[in-house]
Image: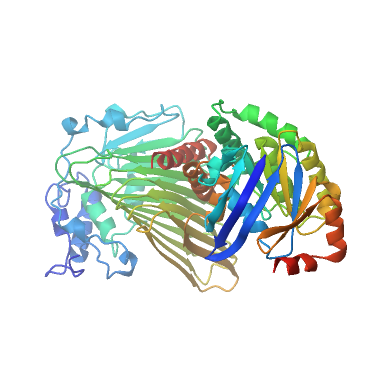
Amino acid sequence: MPGMEARGDGVLGLSLLAPGFGAGEPAGSSWLSRLKAAAARDFAAQGLPTRRREAWKYTDLKPLAEIAFRAPVADDSASVRTLSDLLDLPPPEGSRLVFVHGRYRPDLSFCDLSEAGVSMSPFNAGAGDDKALAARLLGRIATAANQPLVALNTAGMEDGLCIHVRAGVHLQRPIEIVSLGSAASEPLAWHGRTLIVLDDGAQATIIEHQRAPAEMPAPALVNAVTEIALGAAAQLCHYRQQALGTTGFHINAVAATLGTDAVYEAFTLTTGGGLVRNETSVTLDAPGAETRLAGAYLVDGSQHLDTTTLIEHRAPRTTCREVFKGVVDGTAEAVFQGRIVVQREAQGTNADQLSKALLLSDGARVNQKPELEIYADDVKCSHGAAAGQIDREALFYLRSRGVPASVAQRLLIEGFLGDALSQISDAAVREAFSQTAFAWLQDR
Amino acid sequence: MLEIRDLHATVNGKAILKGLTLTVGAGEVHAIMGPNGAGKSTLAYVLAGRDGYEVTGGDFLVDGRSLLDLAPEDRAQAGLFLAFQYPVEIPGVSNSTFLREAVNAQRRSRGEPDLDALQFIKLARQKMNSLGMTDEMLKRPVNVGFSGGEKKRNEVLQLAILEPKVAVMDETDSGLDVDALRTVARAVNALRAPKRSFLMITHYERLLEEIVPDRVHILADGRIVGSGGPELAREIERTGYAAYAAAAA
């Protein structure tokens, strides 16, 4: 393996800022172009993170710097011919917003306008108050400073998507966001950006599907950022399914800030991607705020899956519960970094973190780093991280009843993942995600 | 029926079974008693095909067919059942999923169609009634949080559903109070059938008061050192194993 040190100039990956990535282009709105230009400067100063940064200790982005990515061409219809296959989803219950290479595709999307009190629009095209909302919040929840990939996303993002649910509105049907990549012959990089705002008392469910063909002729970099602001007593269920081709780099950052008694529930199911980083940071900013973060991953081959969470308790009586479970086969590698910070004013905090990995082969690896940083005295915190193999006693027990070894193994893995999947409070999503996970097990 | 012929087995290179021979006829219940370390549980695991139990000589047959070279699941499909002394807890896998997979795996091996969820529940309910088990025990993860009595009843439920030709019951009485023991024994007695053989492995005689065997064998140092009728169990209860252990040495 080549050395870990950065190039001579000390900044990795500057080519990612090449023209065509939006940096410095007139963006049609002064606040947005200023934001993008500042982010481009931020990225140029920071470059891609190296493993010397603590937050990136276990995930090496150096291979990214060696690929000459280019920005996708608008409406690249030749390379999106396989889209219909990738869109093999059941008909949407509500709105389905489809993005190809980070660009909104109205022709593939369906906007359910029957529900009042919700708007979905690009940052610059929304009604007056949505535009103001984007101008006020964008880049404030996920900040470019000290987060080079967020800086890169901000510099390179296209139209973006702002979802705004007005106060007291309870959306009856989920909003689906489908992000597609295609089998392009050149390495492409794109930077999807989403802002989700739920005003006081609003409730919504958002389901994201991130897809690309299993076999991709050239590597792709998907560098997505989602910013979430929840008002008092707002509730968001945010479910993501990632099935990117194994030559893909998928960097995903979610940053959420929660108001009084707000609830943010998130679940991420990852089966695809060559190198995947799922980073979630939640700030529990007001009393009674609660977050439930969970996820399941199933990786094999030489996949690398990094789950990084940062929960900051900044107000009294705030709660977090994290449950992550993963299955690692082949020579795949999983990373779990879970940091929980309880600030002095966050008395009465409840924090609970669990991360377990099941290693199915000798070559499979997992690195886990749970971290608790507690400055308050009245808190209940627990964390557990474990890695293990299939329980041989249980396997024998099942086989002694006539269950073939392969089926017995699958049952045990399903049981192992069940803990995480059961965190999904939406029954239909829980069922669908379980099916996807179990299908992966069937196919191995 | 079960035929064990001059069976030798080692665990971690140590000889535990040293020429065990035993035949349990169709419809018969035999008991194997013996002191700790005689090789009782080893016999159970060797028959079921557990990893780490190496057969170094002899053979055993169910219904005239040698099962020695078969994987554990194939032995079960051939009609062998082991009721575990310590049933294994399997978090995350519901009892009903487990039981349905097991019964359908065995049906498939016989070329029969799978039971669907409804047919399975009907079958399970009918068998559970006789064991005093509730539906709720089907929903719970396999043996997780079950009391000692519930675990053993769950073993007998599997026996009732899978209907094996040969059932090896390893220390079915351990961890049971008197009432639970009676319930389990009643259920086992109800499962006695002309085409089913039972091998009860036990340390104490009290189980054999409830499930009266046709024959009792004393296992010491890896061999059968004495056989008799049910009265042999009562004699052991009075005099202990010392005489047999000495004879085996």
- Residue A177 on image: x %, y %: 36, 38
Q: Is residue B205 or residue A347 the one in the foreground?
A: B205
Task: Residue at 73%, 55% (x, y): give it.
Answer: B171
Locate residue B170 relative to residue A182 in the image: left or right.
right
Q: Is residue A128 or residue A113 the one in the foreground?
A: A113
- Residue A415 on image: x %, y %: 54, 47
Locate residue A396 relative to residue A108 in the image: left or right.
right
Residue A115: tell me if it is visible.
Answer: yes
Task: Residue at 74%, 64% (x, y): give it.
Answer: B35
Q: Is residue A71 above or below residue B126?
A: below
Q: Is residue A71 or residue A398 the one in the foreground?
A: A398
- Residue B182 on image: x %, y %: 84, 47
Q: Quadrant of the N terminus of chain B?
A: top right
Q: Is residue A207 or residue B111 the one in the foreground?
A: B111
Q: Is residue B78 above or below residue B151?
A: above
Color encoding of the figure: rainbow
- Residue A318 on image: x %, y %: 55, 60
How many numbered circles are shown? 0
Residue A260: tell me if it is visible.
Answer: no
